[in-house]
Amino acid sequence: MAIDTRGETADKPSGEKKRTSPALFYRQVVAELRKVIWPKRKELVSYTIIVLVFVLILVGIVSALDALFTEGVLRIFGGA
């Protein structure tokens, strides 16, 4: 037999939904943000550069494939 371990909501019927007050939500968000390990400036710059290089490489690959498939379709079906 499976046991539902989702906390308080596991005990309630699916039709009942408890609403959170905006103040409680804000306190929970602040508490979660305090748990985050924020990157240092040097790490942030290096991660940003890595992501930009990766995106540029993927843009190049997708553009090359698009041009290749476009040329192939035009040769097969005849184009202007």
Image (cartoon, rainbow, N blue to C red):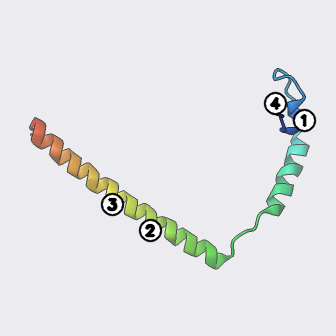
- Give the residue type at disc 4: Met
Say the numbered circle drawn on residue 53: 2
The residue singled out by tag 3 in the image is 60
**Considering only vertical position in the picture, is 67 above or below 18?**
below
The residue singled out by tag 4 in the image is 1
Q: CA distance from mark 1 to mark 3?
A: 49 Å
| Callouts 1 and 2 close, C-beta under 8 Å | no
**Few, some or many C-alpha atoms within 10 Å of disc 4 (few <14, some 14-19, many ≥20)?**
few
Q: Residue at x 81, y 23 (%)?
A: 14
In the rendered image, residue 27, in percent from the top left (x then y), is placed at: 89, 51
Residue placed farthest to the top in the image?
15
Q: CA distance from mark 4 to mark 1?
A: 19 Å
The residue singled out by tag 1 in the image is 8
Residue placed farthest to the bottom in the image?
42
**Few, some or many C-alpha atoms within 10 Å of disc 1 (few <14, some 14-19, many ≥20)?**
few
- Give the residue type at disc 3: Gly
Observer able to see residue 46: yes
Task: Please indicate whether residue 70 sits to the left or right of residue 55 in the image.
Answer: left
Task: Please indicate whether residue 66 sits to the left or right of residue 50 in the image.
Answer: left
Camera-nearest label, 4 or 3: 4
Q: Quadrant of the N terminus?
A: top right
Location of residue 40 (image quadrant): bottom right
Task: Please indicate whether residue 7 sits to the left or right of residue 63 in the image.
Answer: right
| Callouts 4 and 1 close, C-beta under 8 Å | no
SS of the residue under disc 2: helix
Q: Residue at x 90, y 29 (%)?
A: 11
> Reading the chain from its start, which is encountered first: label 3 or label 2?
2
